[in-house]
Image (tube, rainbow, N blue to C red):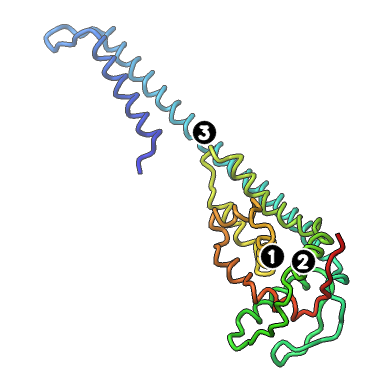
């Protein structure tokens, strides 16, 4: 693809040459050489070449400066993003899920006995892993008592969300930081793919689990819909994570204390 600055440079050069020959005095081989005319030609060519060189130098300087600004923006973005991500991890690591998981006794996932974690990111990883084990178990038969009251389960999640909303909200602030940056610069020729790819890398499975849970209870949440609209996460990710029966089975399998919230 031909550079637009190159095209404009050629156009300006052609226009200048045409104007010069149109307004310059006629030239003939049968007349005595007029040194003034040659001097004018020389001055014109020197001035034209000097102007063109200055123009190309200005264009190259502008492109180099723009590249440096874009590079600086990306560098600042990465530094800010990493800083916010560290704060997010600190927030999650400081969580203590005593109200969410009461028991400390291990129980079996397949043939493996494990102890349920209580603190930090390990809880989110555990919840995601446990859910996927249940979801992918094709031989699982559902106990009819599990789905006896979906409202109680939803109320329990709302209680969990209320207790930990400020910490989980940090996740959405970090993700939303990228969307706000892209929307703010949507009229500029920025490298949107760079930012979307960066976001996609930063959403591991255990965070997708939290996002999926939120989407189930807040389907109109703008940031989650943005994730789908920008193809960062596909709708199938949420579909695979949140299934009516599997969701109930998942909550019950954790032996979470489910009680109706007093209004």
Q: Work out whether residue 167 or residue 101 is closer to the camera in this orientation and state it.
A: 101
Whether tag 1 and tag 3 are in contact, CB under 8 A, the answer is no
Estimate the spatial distance between the alpha carbons at disc 2 and disc 1, rounded to whole Å.
Answer: 9 Å
Rendered view: 189 above or below 114: above
Identify the secondary structure beneath mark 2. helix
The residue labelled by disc 3 is 61
Write down the quadrant of residue 149 in the picture.
Answer: bottom right
Helix or strand or loop: what does disc 1 sit on? helix
Which is closer to the viewer, label 2 or label 3?
A: 2
- Quadrant (top left, top right, bottom left, bottom right) of the N terminus: top left
Q: How many marks?
A: 3
Query: Which label sits in the foreground, 2 or 1?
Result: 2
Residue 80 relative to residue 51: left or right: right
Q: Residues within 10 Å of mark 1 (few under 14, many from 20)?
A: some
Q: Position of residue 218 (x, y in %)?
A: 68, 57
Are the residues flagged by discs 2 and 1 in contact, CB closer than 8 Å? Answer: yes
> What secondary structure is found at the residue carrying circle 3?
helix
For marks 2 and 3 on the same chain, the one whose residue lies earlier in the sequence: 3
Residue 8 in the image, given as x and y percentages of width and height? 37, 29
Task: Find residue 190 and report its horizontal and vertical position in percent.
Answer: 54, 43
How far is disc 2 from disc 3 in space, using C-alphas?
A: 57 Å
Q: Quadrant of the C terminus?
A: bottom right
Residue under circle 1? 213
Q: Is residue 211 or residue 203 the one in the foreground?
A: 211
Checking the image for residue 157, the label placed there is 2
């Amino acid at each position: 693809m031909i550079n637009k600055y190159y095209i404009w440079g050629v156009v300006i050069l052609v226009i200048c040459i045409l104007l010069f020959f149109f307004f310059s005095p006629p030239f003939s081989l049968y007349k005595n050489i007029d040194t003034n005319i040659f001097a004018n030609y020389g001055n014109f060519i020197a001035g034209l070449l000097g102007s063109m060189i200055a123009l190309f130098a200005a264009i190259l300087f502008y492109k180099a400066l723009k590249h440096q600004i874009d590079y600086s923006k990306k560098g600042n973005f990465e530094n800010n993003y990493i800083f916010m991500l560290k704060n997010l991890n600190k927030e999650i690591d400081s969580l203590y899920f005593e109200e969410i998981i009461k028991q400390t006794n291990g129980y079996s996932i397949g043939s493996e006995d494990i102890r349920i974690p209580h603190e930090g990111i390990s809880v989110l990883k555990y919840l995601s892993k446990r859910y996927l084990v249940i979801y992918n178990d094709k031989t699982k038969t559902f106990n009819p008592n599990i789905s006896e009251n979906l409202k109680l389960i939803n109320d329990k999640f709302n209680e969990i969300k209320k207790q930990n909303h400020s910490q989980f909200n940090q996740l959405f602030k970090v993700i939303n930081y990228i969307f706000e940056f892209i929307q703010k610069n949507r009229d500029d020729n920025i490298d949107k793919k760079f930012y979307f790819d960066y976001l996609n890398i930063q959403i591991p499975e255990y965070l997708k689990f939290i996002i999926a849970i939120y989407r189930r209870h807040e389907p109109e949440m703008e940031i989650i819909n943005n994730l789908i609209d920008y193809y960062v996460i596909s709708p199938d990710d949420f579909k695979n994570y949140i299934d009516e029966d599997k969701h109930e089975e998942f909550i019950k399998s954790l032996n979470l204390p489910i009680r109706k919230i007093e209004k």
